[in-house]
Image (cartoon, helix red, strand yellow):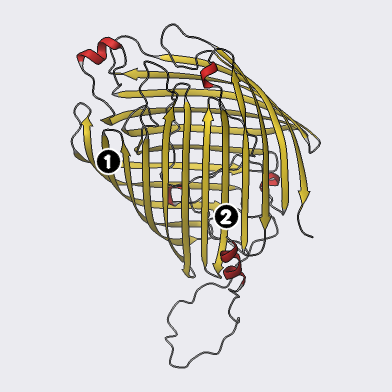
């Protein structure tokens, strides 16, 4: 990171009016002048800054996902932040059992620290939270939890940008570290349309994305990511599988008009897990619209080809063509944020299934009611159709009641309330309901749960530098 900072500092813009060679091709389109913001980078909000209309790179192409923060919360500066969160959670069915549910109450404490630094050519954040969760009815799951987040954005030259992000977590059950409302996203990210029963989950995701604004109205780029998911302390009678997803993509975007960029993208995903592997080739037409730092809309559609090896689900071919696509939009103001989206593509099975064809629809709404008080609503529905099963069903497995489902549908909804007292004290409480339906399994394995949580936090901030 220090080397990139030194390299970035040495990339000064060229003179605005360099000497022209009379023999040069005057018809060639010159690159745009150096801009005050970076493609794909969520910078400080300034309503008077209209010098940049480069797009925020969507998560599909390796950029950061849409944040639920208000515009003032997106403002960045140089700070060292720290604090501690103390919380309690009640879960009516942490094992996601269809019968004989056992509830659980847990208490947790999570100290956290984060450093933020911004300059004209570099912005980065590094945050860590770690602590202990104590379960009343599942003492074997009393383990420490850790979360480490790093997101860096560099301007290597006036027209070349680089983003490097890392997200590591090791958690047991519900984890609320209070590390802010930002999102670290990217291609090949986790499947959030499946819920695994209470267990220790260790995951890490690395994303590298770069783009080159090589002409006034043209932008090219590429990204790569690696995501792995591992489980330990799995409950008896539950089958979870470790998985890895490696992704790479390349794209070209052309500006149609100010704020609207359209183009094409190719993406490759390799999903592996115990007992199977899928290789997925995706060809997309992409359009991203960004208006005045407030409204963002992204859409993509195209063919998707998959090669599957392992235990195939019923009526699934080893190779297949399908249509993938989706759209996601977000709107932010001083006191309100709203995002919603739909997608259909091949994804990992979040440890519960192997490779799946995922369809997901979601919506999030966050509103500041009065100064110091904010409320949030969220809802989602996802269907996961297995392409490869981690372990096929057989009569013996069916008798034991742990037969793998061929499809799982998840519906979730929640509400939360936040209270901030000054800049130091915060209170967050909320409720979530989840209903998970399993198809292709004997009996009635459907499960639901209700979760109530409350978190009290103390945070401090110290300015860095001048």
**Place of residue 277 in the rendered image (x, y in percent of width and height, measured from the top left):** 27, 39
Q: Residues within 10 Å of mark 2 (few under 14, many from 20)?
A: many
The residue beneath circle 1 is 278
Relative to 123, is 30 above or below?
Answer: below
**Place of residue 201 in the rendered image (x, y in percent of width and height, measured from the top left):** 47, 31
Q: In the rendered view, does 451 fall on the left or right side of 390?
A: right
For residue 320, which quarter of the picture?
top left
Q: Which is nearer the eye, 448 or 66?
A: 448
Q: Tag on residue 346?
A: none
Q: Residue at x 46, y 15 (%)?
A: 448
At mark 1, the secondary structure is strand
Earlier-in-chain disc, 1 versus 2: 2
For residue 136, which quarter of the picture?
top right
Relative to 443, is 316 above or below?
Answer: below
**Place of residue 417 in the rendered image (x, y in percent of width and height, measured from the top left):** 68, 26
- The quarter of the image holding the C terminus is bottom right
Q: Which is nearer the eye, 349 or 321?
A: 349
At mark 2, the secondary structure is strand
- The quarter of the image holding the N terminus is bottom right
Q: Tag on residue 152?
A: 2
């Amino acid at each position: 990171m220090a080397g990139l900072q030194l390299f970035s500092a040495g990339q000064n813009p060229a003179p605005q009016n360099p000497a022209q060679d009379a023999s040069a091709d005057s018809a060639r389109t010159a690159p745009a002048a150096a801009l005050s913001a970076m493609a794909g980078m969520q910078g400080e909000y300034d309503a008077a800054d209209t010098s940049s209309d480069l797009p925020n790179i969507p998560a599909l192409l390796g950029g950061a996902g849409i944040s639920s923060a208000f515009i003032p919360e997106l403002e960045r500066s140089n700070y060292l932040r720290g604090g501690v969160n103390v919380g309690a959670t009640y879960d009516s069915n942490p094992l996601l059992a269809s019968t004989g549910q056992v509830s659980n109450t847990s208490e947790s404490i999570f100290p956290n620290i984060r450093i933020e630094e911004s300059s004209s050519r570099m912005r980065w954040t590094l945050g860590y939270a770690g602590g202990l969760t104590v379960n009343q009815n599942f003492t074997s799951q009393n383990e420490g939890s850790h979360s480490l987040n790093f997101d860096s954005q560099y301007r290597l030259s006036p027209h070349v940008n680089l983003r490097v992000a890392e997200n590591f977590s090791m958690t047991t059950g519900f984890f609320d570290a209070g590390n802010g409302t930002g999102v670290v996203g990217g291609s090949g990210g986790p499947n959030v349309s499946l819920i695994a029963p209470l267990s220790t989950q260790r995951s890490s995701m690395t994303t590298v994305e770069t783009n080159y604004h090589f002409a006034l109205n043209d932008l090219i780029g590429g990204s790569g990511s690696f995501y792995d998911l591992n489980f330990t302390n799995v409950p008896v009678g539950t089958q979870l599988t470790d998985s890895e997803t490696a992704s790479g993509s390349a794209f070209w975007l052309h500006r149609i008009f100010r704020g609207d960029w359209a183009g094409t993208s190719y993406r490759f995903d390799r999903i592996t897990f115990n007992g199977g592997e899928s290789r997925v080739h995706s060809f997309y037409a992409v359009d991203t619209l960004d208006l005045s730092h407030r409204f963002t809309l992204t859409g993509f559609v195209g063919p998707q080809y998959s090669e599957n090896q392992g235990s195939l689900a019923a009526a699934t071919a080893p190779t297949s063509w399908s249509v993938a696509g989706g759209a996601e939009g977000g709107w932010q103001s001083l006191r309100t944020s709203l995002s919603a989206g739909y997608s259909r593509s091949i994804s990992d099975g979040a440890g519960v299934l192997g490779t799946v064809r995922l369809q997901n629809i979601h919506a999030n709404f966050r509103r500041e009611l009065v100064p110091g008080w904010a409320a949030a609503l969220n809802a989602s529905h996802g269907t996961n159709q297995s392409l490869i099963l981690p372990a096929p069903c057989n009569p013996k497995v069916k008798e034991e009641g742990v037969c793998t489902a061929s499809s799982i549908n998840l519906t979730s909804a929640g509400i939360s309330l936040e209270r901030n007292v000054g800049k130091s004290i915060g209170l967050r409480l909320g409720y979530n309901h989840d209903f998970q339906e399993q198809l292709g399994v004997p009996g009635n394995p459907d499960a639901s749960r209700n979760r109530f949580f409350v978190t009290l936090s103390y945070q401090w901030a110290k300015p860095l530098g001048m």
